[in-house]
Image (spheres, rainbow, N blue to C red):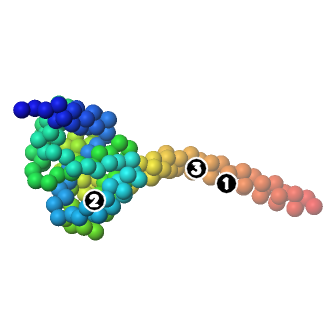
Amino acid sequence: MVTEAKISMVKQLTDELKNNSAFFITEYKGLKVSDLVELRNSLRTFNSSYRVVKNTLFRRALNDIGLKDAGEFFHGPVAVAFVSGDVVPAVKALMDFNKKNSNLKVKAAVVDGKLLSSAEIQTLALLPGRNVLLAMIMRTAMGPVNNFVFILKGQLNKLVWVLNALKDRKS
């Protein structure tokens, strides 16, 4: 029998899935409560949240938004990290915590509607953050402009040197 509380919980989870850019499915078996609190606090700094979910209710929420494939990872004790901002810092925080505490296992993730395996998540953790990537793109785009300015400056310097040499000869 479906209760109002369960319907409300599925609706809340569905809304949370729609409002976040990504979520990470983790297994927390063997973690202490203090470890979970530490993980929650570290993720909170990256505009993310971490919560334990009921597998059946979360699978229903996934079905509601059309992500049935992600439902296969919901066995045993599962918690979900919801990310609403930049994904890379949050996944780095998860992987750093995983290095310190091997009981946390990142099973899968959904980023912008695409299901990622644990290997793809580890690759994602190696990427630099959004701001660093933007800086790299800008540096690459500005390279030819900077070279052009340097060449023009060099030509002007040569002209000044020639004029100074002429001035020295005449004096």
Sequence-first disc among 3 and 1 = 3
**Disc 2 packing (10 Å; few <14; some 14–19; many ≥20):** some
**Residue sitting nearer the eye, 23 or 124:** 23
Image coordinates for residue 88, horizontal then vertical, percent: 35, 51
Q: Is 82 rendered above or below residue 161? A: above
Sequence-first disc among 1 and 2 = 2
Q: Is 48 rendered above or below residue 41? A: above
**Residue sitting nearer the eye, 145 or 8:** 8
Which SS class for mark 3?
helix
Name the disc covering residue 36, or none: 2
Query: Which residue extends farthest right?
Result: 171
Regarding residue 52, the answer to whether it shows in the image is yes
Q: Which part of the image, by quadrant, shows the C terminus?
A: bottom right
Residue under the point 21% across and 32% down:
8
Residue under the point 39% across and 47% down:
47
Q: Which residue is mark 3?
A: 146
Q: Which mark is in front, 1 or 2?
A: 2
Residue under the point 27% across and 59% down:
36
**Which amino acid, mark 2?**
Leu
Contact (Cβ within 8 Å) of mark 1 with mark 2: no
How many circles with numbers are drawn on the protein? 3
**Which amino acid, mark 3?**
Asn
Q: CA distance from mark 1 to mark 2?
A: 60 Å
Name the disc covering residue 154, or none: 1
Image coordinates for residue 15, horizontal then vertical, percent: 27, 33
**Which amino acid, mark 1?**
Gly
Sequence-first disc among 3 and 2 = 2
Q: Which part of the image, by quadrant, shows the N terminus?
A: top left
Q: CA distance from mark 3 to mark 1?
A: 12 Å
**Disc 3 packing (10 Å; few <14; some 14–19; many ≥20):** few
